[in-house]
Amino acid sequence: MSITNIDIKKNQNNELPHHVVIVMDGNGRWAKKRLLPRTAGHHAGVKTTRKIVEQCVARKIQALTIFAFSSENWRRPEQEVSSLMELFVSALQTEVKSLHEQQVRVRFIGDVSAFSNKLQEMIVQTMQLTGSNSGLQLNIAVNYGGRWDIAQACKKITEKVQRGELRSENIDAQIVSEHVCLAELPEPDLFIRTGGEQRISNFLIWQMAYTELYFTDLLWPDFDQQAFDEALIWFAGRQRRFGKTGEQIEQSGHG
Ligand code: IPE
Ligand code: IPE
Ligand code: MG
């Protein structure tokens, strides 16, 4: 099945997502099945990431946010953590040129202060190089946690109150939304998690209040462009109600 074959009449919301978020899970199990070290799974995962970014560019999706390293992933064996750090450096070295050529604008979200100076410098350079690109907005979540994100938003809001720029009685959900990561983008409309687990693992917990959740048993290195298109087709078939009834949505012509 390809996206061009979608039967438009069957579609509920009849559109592509504006903002896709992905928990790229299953690298370790992919390697284990092949009797390879877990690192080999992470290397294979980078190839999948490259293809899915290309697919988002081809599909003209506005934004893609990928979970590369969670604030909880520091709990892994030291050797795996350090090889993941090396992989981030080498992947940035090999991928950034091509991302730039594809007009991809790369950003990182998460507490990058925990990373080596070298990695932090590369992160800044990548954001500067690609900052004025007009194509896909690619957000890479590293040392990211949804609870960290909400806490850092609270900190910024409190500072504004202390400076007299904001009154505490005016703090509402909209204000919090403006201070969490990715505030400038449409909220994620499609979440994809590979690897068979059906959990959010502290990803964008504030931003995903109304996101459609898609889970697949495919391990991340086995996820391909066709599998991505299947998720897009599944998304197109969702009726997004945002609290209203199905009848209301149909009457307003979005059904
Ligand atoms: C996801 O794959 C990649 C990272 C968390 C960095 P895993 O490494 O979690 O793979 P599994 O879940 O062990 O198979
Ligand atoms: C989530 O995967 C984080 C990333 C994909 C980077 P994990 O494999 O760390 O999630 P849990 O621990 O199984 O929930
Ligand atoms: Mg995992």
Image (tube, rainbow, N blue to C red):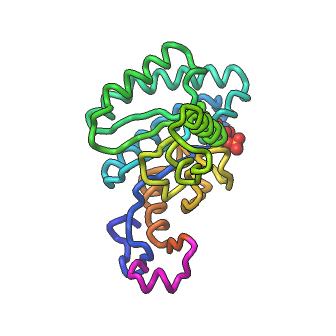
Residue 119 or residue 77, whichever sits in front = 119
**Image quadrant in which you'd find residue 31:** top right
Q: Is residue 143 magenta?
A: no
Q: Is residue 59 left or right of residue 162?
A: left
Q: Is residue 85 above or below residue 226?
A: above
Q: Residue at x 60, y 31 (%)?
A: 143
Q: Is residue 201 left or right of residue 182?
A: right
Range of residues picked out in magenta: 243-255
* Residue 106 makes an appearance in the image: yes
121 vs 242, nearest the viewer: 242
Question: Is residue 31 visible in this depiction of the protein?
Answer: no
The x, y position of residue 158, in whole percent, is: 61, 36
Looking at the picture, how far across and down is residue 19, in whole percent?
44, 53
Given residues 105 and 33, the one toward you in this image is 105
Which quadrant would the N terminus be assigned to in this image?
bottom left
Q: In the rendered structure, does residue 254 fall within the stretch colored magenta?
A: yes
Report the quarter where the C terminus lies.
bottom left
Q: Is 168 located above or below residue 99 in the figure? A: below
Displayed quadrant of residue 74: top right
Q: Where residue 234 sits in the image (x, y, percent)?
A: 49, 67
Residue at coordinates 46% horizontally, 22% vertically from top-left?
A: 90
Q: Is residue 77 above or below residue 200?
A: above
Residue depicted at x 44% and y 24%: 123
Please tell me which residue is depicted at 52% across the width and 31% down the height of the picture. 43
Q: Residue 129 at what x, y percent from top left? A: 31, 26
Disc count in the image? Answer: 0
Place residue 173 in its image quadrant: bottom right
Q: Give the farthest residue toward the top.
A: 117
Q: Is residue 198 left or right of residue 187?
A: right
